């Protein structure tokens, strides 16, 4: 039987094309998806990678072979697929490898209403059934389902603008770096009719990513955007990843803005509309986020890292908003799904509703010095974590918790160490009251990890 465990991850499917992921597998997954979910119809979209269209077509053949109808939205961002799943109330699949290099592709799946499918909520069953179908050669039998083409870009853009009021903002100069990804397709439609002077960077859809990797969490991928913002005297810069479900913000000085700062800003805006609401933040988001949420009458809830945990906790608590350090932002009004574009519109609205520069607007939401994520390659993750635990346990005023990896907290500092699920790495995030203290905490933790 085919072994699909390498490409079926905790939350999605991802692998090198065609060595690990090909049309035969996509077709089997389409059939298995319908069988496992019981879907009568499925909506799908795909990014700009050359393999995405053929993989989507193969998935459709598998789905229709099991009698399901397929609504093909064609090109789209991942959050456009969530809009499609939510507005049409259909299970969905997005063909993308997000920020991964050009040779990769993958699938992000959800149930009707954009409810995520992960390894413990159906993805493992889909994997196992697809493997059986490949082994038995039964993934491509003729069926009664049909494929319907439907352009959902306009509806997606219109819906986002009902969630954030930009009608009264002042004119803004905005530079957007799409990284040759799907932001180049969605931004022009979403920005239509807004008082925005847009400078586009790398809007040409090109899955080979000729200019830079479409991953804004890596500082080197922001250099062109930062320079363009300063050179053009822009009010703000925005970078999207390959499937445009994440956004990164650059202020008018060309300085990178922490996603924790954006989380706090959007949380305050959502709390103004929904007083007393719950806000989700993962455990490596700045401590400033829960402080600011409480100050504005909200209820902060801390979760593990990962979109499935955040979405599950949002659904459980009815949270109005959630933010992650990775620049994923989740909205109750968007079917609890993440949308980089919706987060960007909130920042644009906050900036355009008053006359101060972005750096001043955001200064009230940034309180601490942080290290960013630092990876250490270790032979034995458990042993390294044990060393850190032993080093810091018992110190006066220090607490430890293991919600996700190991979090060590002092009076005015904390750090978290999490093992990678796919590589022999430990990921460190540290934060403290000032830069000097943060550096001391960071360096001590790294020294123990790497000893």
Image (cartoon, rainbow, N blue to C red):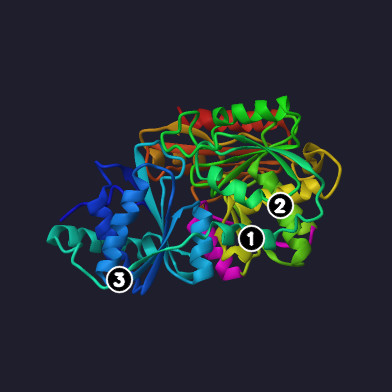
Which of the 4 image quarters holds residue 362?
top right
Residue 272 magenta: no
Q: What is the spatial separation of the Cα atoms under label 3 and label 2, in whole angstroms?
A: 39 Å
Is 407 left or right of 234, judged from the image as shown? left
Residue pictured at 29% horizontal, 67% vertical: 64
Mark 3 or 2: in front is 2
Q: Can you identify the residue that label 2 sits on?
A: 193
Label 3, secondary structure: give it: loop
Residue at 77% across, 50% down: 350
Magenta residues (range): 296-317
Residue at left 50%, top 41%?
181
From the image, tell me which residue sits under label 3: 145
Residue 199 horizontal side relative to residue 7, left or right? right
Extreme residue toward the left, this view: 136
The circle on residue 158 is 1
Q: Residue 71 vs residue 398: left or right?
A: left
Residue 144, horizontal then vertical, whole percent? 26, 73
Mark 2–mark 1 Cα distance, whole angstroms, equals: 11 Å
Q: Could you tell me how many numbered marks the image carries?
A: 3
Q: 410 or 165: nearer the eye?
A: 165
């Amino acid at each position: 039987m085919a072994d699909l465990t390498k490409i079926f991850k905790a939350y999605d499917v991802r692998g090198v094309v065609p060595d690990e992921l090909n049309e035969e597998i996509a077709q089997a997954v389409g059939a298995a998806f319908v069988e496992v979910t019981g879907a009568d119809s499925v909506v799908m979209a795909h990014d700009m990678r050359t393999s995405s269209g053929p993989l989507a077509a193969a998935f459709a053949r598998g789905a229709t072979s099991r009698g399901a109808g397929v609504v093909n939205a064609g090109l789209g961002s991942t959050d456009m697929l969530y809009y499609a799943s939510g507005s049409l109330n259909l299970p969905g699949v997005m063909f993308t490898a997000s920020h991964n290099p050009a040779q990769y592709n993958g699938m992000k799946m959800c149930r009707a209403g954009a409810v995520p499918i992960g390894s413990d909520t159906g993805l493992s069953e889909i994997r196992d059934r697809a493997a059986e179908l490949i082994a038995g050669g039964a993934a491509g039998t003729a069926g009664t389902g049909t494929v319907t083409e439907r352009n959902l870009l306009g509806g997606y853009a219109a819906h986002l603008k009902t969630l954030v009021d930009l009608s009264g903002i002042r004119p803004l100069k905005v530079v957007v770096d799409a990284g040759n990804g799907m932001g180049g397709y969605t931004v022009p439609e979403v920005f239509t009719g807004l008082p925005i002077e847009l400078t586009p960077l790398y809007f040409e859809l090109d899955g080979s990513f000729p200019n830079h990797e479409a991953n804004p969490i890596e500082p080197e991928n922001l250099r062109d955007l930062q320079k363009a913002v300063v050179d053009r005297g822009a009010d703000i810069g925005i970078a999207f990843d390959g499937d445009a479900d994440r956004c990164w913000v650059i202020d008018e000085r060309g300085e990178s803005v922490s996603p924790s700062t954006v989380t706090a800003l959007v949380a305050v805006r959502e709390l103004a509309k929904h007083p007393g609401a719950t806000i989700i933040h993962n455990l490596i988001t700045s401590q400033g986020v829960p402080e600011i949420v409480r100050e504005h009458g909200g209820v902060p809830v801390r979760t593990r890292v990962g979109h499935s945990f955040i979405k599950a906790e949002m659904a459980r608590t009815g949270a109005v908003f959630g933010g992650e350090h990775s620049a994923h932002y989740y909205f109750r009004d968007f079917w609890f799904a993440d949308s980089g574009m919706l987060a960007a519109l909130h920042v644009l609205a906050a900036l355009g509703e008053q006359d101060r520069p972005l750096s001043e607007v955001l200064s009230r939401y940034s309180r601490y010095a942080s290290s960013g994520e630092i990876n250490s390659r270790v032979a034995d993750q458990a042993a390294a974590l044990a060393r850190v635990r032993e080093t810091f346990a018992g110190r006066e005023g220090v607490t430890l918790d293991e919600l996700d990896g190991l979090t060590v907290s002092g009076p005015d500092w904390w750090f978290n160490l999490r093992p990678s699920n796919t590589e022999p790495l430990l990921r460190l995030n540290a934060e403290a009251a000032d830069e000097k203290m943060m550096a001391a905490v960071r360096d001590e933790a790294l020294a123990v990890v790497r000893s």
